[in-house]
Image (tube, helix red, strand yellow):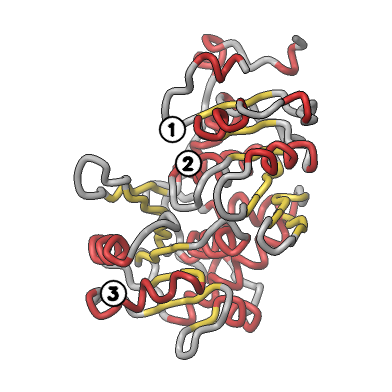
Amino acid sequence: MSDFLQLPDYDQAQASLALPVPEFYNFGFDLIDKRASQADKTALIYDDANTGELHKIRFSDLADASARFANVLTEMGVEPGAFAFMMIPRIPAWYEATIGCIKAGVVAMPGTNLLMPKDIEYRINKSRATTAIVTAEHAEKIEAVHDKCPTLKHLIIVGAPREGRLHFEAACADASADYPRDKAPATRADEMMLAYFTSGTTAFPKMVPRNHAYALAHAITARYWQDLREDDVHWTISDTGWAKFAWGMIFGQWQIGATLVLYNPGPGFDADAHLKLIAKHKVTTFCAPPTAYRAFAQLDLGDYDLSTLRHSISAGEPLNPEVIKT
């Protein structure tokens, strides 16, 4: 195996690793906008199995879209430090909304798309969220608990418009793509940027805060675990509501400058479609949960072109040796 394909020596990497963290840091400005102006390239390859939509999104597209949403939040009166509950599937709007929140100093709080009304009520009330950003299919879940969430003031709908509610796409289209940093709150690296909730398997879900330095620190994840370089095409399979999406599909990968595959699947898990996507988009590094690898192992892998893959990883639970060998 060539040196290029090998991860760095662990002892050497440990001894030499340095990751300076500035006093103030904002992923939206310091990474997305900087790449848009200095090293613009394809950030996302978006492939939707439900609509057939397929297109490439550049860092400059994300810079403009996130600025528009940051302006929407500011004009609505959503204050820096306020929490925004998010329930958006694997579509570009998740990135636009999340990065827009980060720029505006609003704490994004992603939730898995399987949450039910009682789960949403619990998370909104625990965080005292003032804003909810959800796709149209989840709007009724918010409506069902709105009266039980006294801090919730704003509901933003992504996708199909809903009467009496702010429409994400329309509001962003009307907003300016100019959101200068001197207009935005100065976010300290140690201030809260994101908040996740644990699954609640053993007790009530617990809120897990992540500060702005979290986005910078995941450069270590991308370089030393995912083995990423700037010319890589990386794909992590994860729901947007889990922290795995944060460390597999946004922060570290774009610190390195890799391109991401954003695949919005149809119902169920189609192992055949996922394996074909690796060749279609020339994926070089790949991360999937053990259940996906077990499904892949049931197929004749000789039928698929996996020649672009050089590094595959897994997370979530142990993966049995037989499947790893396959």
What residue do we see at 64% from left, 40% from top? 235
Looking at this view, name the residue that lies furthest to the bottom. Answer: 164
What residue do we see at 64% from left, 33% from top? 286
Residue 145 vertical position relative to residue 185 in the rendered view, above or below? below
Residue 241 vertical position relative to residue 224 in the rendered view, above or below? below
Query: Which residue is denoted by mark 1 in the rendering?
Result: 316
Mark 1 residue type: Gly
Residue 263 vertical position relative to residue 174 in the rendered view, above or below? above
Instruction: Estimate the x, y position of residue 74 in percent, counting from the top left.
Output: 47, 76
Callout in the foreground (3, 2): 3
Query: Which residue is denoted by mark 3 in the rendering?
Result: 145
- Mark 3 / mark 2, whichever is N-terminal: 3
Mark 3 residue type: Val
Q: Where residue 244 is drawn, which disc sits there?
A: 2
Asked if residue 274 lies left or right of residue 196, the reply is right
Q: Secondary structure at mark 2?
A: helix
**Count of marks overlaid on the render:** 3
- Mark 1 / mark 2, whichever is N-terminal: 2
Crowding near the residue tagged with mark 1, few <14, some 14–19, many ≥20 C-alpha atoms within 10 Å: few
**Which of the 4 image quarters holds residue 178?**
bottom right
- Cα–Cα gap, marks 1 and 2: 9 Å
Instruction: Estimate the x, y position of residue 206 in percent, counting from the top left.
Output: 25, 48
111 or 216: nearer the viewer:
111
- Cα–Cα gap, marks 1 and 3: 31 Å
- Mark 1 / mark 3, whichever is N-terminal: 3
183 or 173: nearer the viewer:
173
Tag 1–tag 3 contact (CB < 8 Å): no
Tag 1–tag 2 contact (CB < 8 Å): yes
Mark 2 residue type: Lys
